Image (cartoon, grey):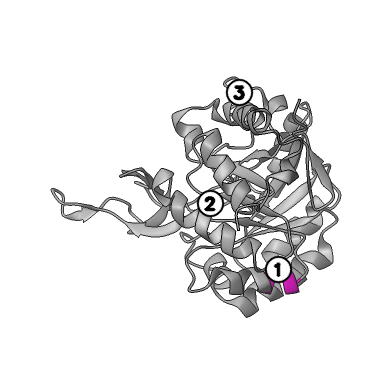
Amino acid sequence: MADMRVNIAGVEWKNPVTTASGTFGSGAEFAEFVDLNQIGAVTTKGVANIPWPGNPTPRVAETYGGMMNAVGLQNPGIDLFCERDIPFLRQYDTKIIVNVCGKSTEDYCEVVERLAQEDVDMLEINISCPNVKEGGIAFGQNPKAAEEITKAVKKYAKQPVIMKLSPNVTDITEMAKAVEAGGADAISLINTLTGMKIDIHRRAFALANKTGGVSGPAIKPIAVRMVYQVANAVRLPIIGMGGIASADDAIEFLLAGASAVSVGTANFVNPGVTAEIVEGIEKYMDRYGFHTVSEMVGIVK
């Protein structure tokens, strides 16, 4: 019987599967479709210091092998989140990872400081969302800025800090090394790739924002490559994501060097996919004689 437990920056998950931020609400939206007790951790939608209205519509479009979104991190703000979402998730035997977004260093620090008193397990800092016109994009695409925001957040954080990297950079390892130098406890990658779609009949952009973040199976090979590069450049645990839709996909990320995986777009297609992936990883481990998940991590060199 395979031992599915993984340890990410001192936090033990019952299995290596979580949900990608923005694709799972804060868990309540999916609770009737999948047993949250079966998932290693639930990663929440991005939360800011004040409510954000998000971008104008249309803000979602289908693309070949995936989708594109410019939701713009619409969220109800930290106050409502602490009052409503944390107590909901605490009913379940799963770890809580709160994704934090902001438009300035102060915004991020305010949320992180507030969460220091809350019963959550880890923080994921979104420095990479490509559809927010101010803030995130600068932090995630400049190594110096990424290191500085990491340092700033770490001053206030009581939980381990996962820095979520943007793939929209020249060299992903440079960004990983920057957040490692800033004191990050773990790294998650990749966020969405910036794309564009045009409606040829309306002769207009498919999204009101013009550009959006591309996700889904089409981006998986890029994500696997970036996870492999980062795993071989830093010593931090990695949560790999980008186009995972099956256990086979998840295992690829583990073999490339991720210690855990995050499932995003696939939740929209099959709301129970996370539990299926957990089961599939376990079967694979039994089939090939792996006793622990860590035995698989990064063994393809």
Task: Indicate yes or no whether the magenta region holds residue 73.
Answer: no
Viewer-closest of 156 and 79: 156
Where residue 87 sits, quadrant-wise, is: top right
Q: CA distance from mark 1 to mark 2?
A: 17 Å
In the rendered image, the quadrant that contains the C terminus is: bottom right
Point out the tag, 1 or 2, that comes first from the N-terminus. 2
Label the magenta part by its dominant secondary structure: helix
- Mark 2 neighbour class, 10 Å CA radius: few under 14, some 14 to 19, many 20 or more: many
Residue at x-position 75% and y-position 33%: 94
Residue type at tag 3: Val
- Identify residue type, mark 1: Glu
Quick check: can you spot residue 291? yes
Q: Residue furthest left?
A: 201
Specify the label residue 106 is tagged with.
Answer: 1
Q: Quadrant of residue 61?
A: top left
Q: Residue at label 2?
A: 73
Give the spatial CA distance, label 3 vs label 1: 36 Å
Graded by Cα atoms within 10 Å as few (under 14), some (14 to 19) or many (20 or more), the crowding at tag 1 reads some
Mark 1 near mark 2, Cβ–Cβ under 8 Å? no
Image location (x, y in percent) of residue 192: 48, 55
The residue range painted magenta reads: 178-182
Measure the C-alpha gap from mark 2 to mark 3: 24 Å
The residue where tag 3 is placed is 34
Looking at the rendered structure, the kind of residue marked 2 is Leu
Relative to residue 285, is residue 257 depicted above or below?
A: below
Instruction: Give coordinates of residue 110: x percent, y percent.
Output: 75, 61
Q: What numbered label is drawn on residue 267?
A: none
Left or right of 240, for residue 93: right
